[in-house]
Amino acid sequence: MPRSRGASRARPNLATKATSKPALTVSRNELLVDGSDRTFRQLVHSLLAFLARHENVREGHAAAIGLAGIEYTVLISVKHLSAEGNVSVRELADHLYLSGAFVTTVSNKLQKIGLIDKLVDPVDRRRVRLTVTAAGEGLLAKLNPIQRRVNDVQFDCLTAAEFRQLLGSVERLVESSDRAIALQRYLATPEGPSAELNRKVGHEVGLVDG
């Protein structure tokens, strides 16, 4: 059969199409390997993959005792912090890097279903102490054998020294990430807002003095 007029045209070879080199997403020498940010990108994507998997683990722990992930986190955090002394909403929020208002909302729900109590501090009656109830203790005790085995497997790749180093690194990354978010908001601020607002946000991330 005769070919149509357009059938003989050569198709473009997409594989040989020139592409520009991607711009660096970081500029600090400490984050570049041979002038490339490829390793940095690998780190970012690996962190995202780990966090997604750890969230699955947390949700699994929570589901085993009938709670949502954040409810489980608040409950077990109150339990562990209580071993070191009285626990206030503010102290719990600081420990979890969350806002006090959000922790109050979650703790109120846990109080409503009988898993934590809120007691007036006998020393400072303006403060409220969070404690785990007997029912909450029972749920955590039920979860513990499974939780311990799962956590051991998830972190079995770390030596004791690596574990301590990772903890320090992650805590510093949380702090620097807060500064990065503030910087991102500062750079995204339109020209309309006042110079005072720009200066305030810039000061938070070290862009301006005073």
Image: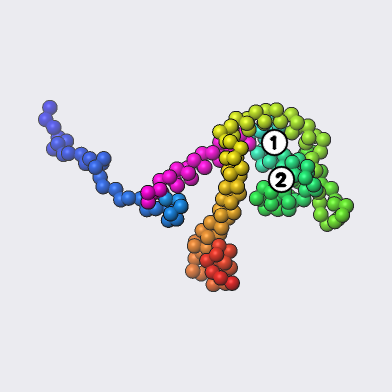
Give residue 201's quadrant in the image.
Answer: bottom right
Quick one: label 1, few (<14), some, or many (20+) residues within 10 Å? some
Camera-nearest residue between 72 and 155: 155
For residue 67, the mark is 1
In the rendering, at what x and y percent does residue 163 appear? 60, 40
- Amino acid at circle 1: Leu
Instruction: Residue at 26%, 41% (x, y): give it.
Output: 14
Residue placed furthest toward the right: 122
In the rendering, at what x and y percent does residue 95 appear? 69, 49
- Amino acid at circle 2: Val
For the C terminus, the image quarter is: bottom right
Position of residue 41 relative to residue 185, above or below, is above
Q: Is residue 43 magenta?
A: yes
Q: Is residue 67 magenta?
A: no
Residue 57 seen anywhere in this rendered image of the structure:
yes
Task: Give the side of residue 31 with respect to residue 161, left or right.
Answer: left
For residue 106, the mark is 2
For the N terminus, the image quarter is: top left
Camera-nearest residue between 189 and 140: 140
Camera-nearest residue between 133 and 29: 29
SS state under label 2: helix
Identify the magenta region.
Answer: 33-58
Position of residue 40 relative to residue 68, above or below, is below
Which of pointers 1 and 2 lies earlier in the amino acid sequence?
A: 1
For residue 126, the mark is none
Q: CA distance from mark 1 to mark 2?
A: 11 Å
Residue placed furthest toward the left: 2
In the rendering, at what x and y percent does residue 161 appear? 59, 40
